[in-house]
Image (cartoon, grey):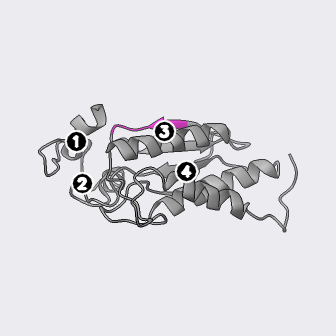
Amino acid sequence: MSRPSSNLQINSDRLWAAIHETGKFGGTPKGGVRRLTLSEEDRLVRDWFRDACEAAGCEVYVDALGSMFAVRPGRDNSKPPVGLGSHLDTQPTGGKFDGILGTLAGLEVFRTLNDAGIETDAPLCLVNWTNEEGSRFAPAMMASAAYAGEFTVDDILSRRDAEGLTVREALDQ
């Protein structure tokens, strides 16, 4: 693989296209996005994200709370991965950029590194955290908080939305 270039730049057209393509999942008539966590729209964008990450050479893992971890191998995969990411879910009246820009920017970093033939020393891990917005299940930042040890997995899985559906049930749908 080649050495990193000081002129390395993302493909902004590709990133812009990804933003608009994913904006169709839960897109609203006025250009916003309604993509509540673990809804059908969220499932569709998660499938798109998984496919895009796999196409970029990543292995994608999903944890017990539905968070997605796309790992791009490095030269030394015994090293801890360098993490980046955000979330794909939105507020009920969200925009095209909130949350998803962080995940799509991370994906674009992977694609740009691939285009340039750059192999990183350590693996890279792009995360899509489940229920960061907290608009369907309380609390916000649910999965990342559990990952940080603030909540147990069982506590999170038992949380209910306004219709009485638990996170566990929503994950199983």
Residue at (26% x, 38% y) in the render: 170
Task: Give the amino acid type for the residue marked by disc 2 in the picture.
Answer: Arg
CB within 8 Å, label 3 to label 4: no
Q: Which mark is residue 104?
A: none
Q: Mark 1 sits on what residue?
A: 157
Residue range corresponding to the magenta coloring:
60-64
Q: Is residue 114 or residue 164 the one in the foreground? A: 164
**Which label is found at residue 136?**
2
In the rendered image of this protein, does residue 145 appear above or below residue 48? below
Position of the N terminus, as image quadrant, is top right
Mark 3 is surrounded, within 10 Å at the Cα level, by few (under 14), some (14 to 19) or many (20 or more) other residues, namely few
State the SS at label 4: strand
User: Looking at this view, is 89 or 18 the one in front?
Assistant: 18
Give the amino acid type for the residue marked by disc 4 in the picture: Leu
List the residue tagged with mark 3.
Answer: 47
Q: Which comes before the other along the chain, label 4 or label 1?
A: 4
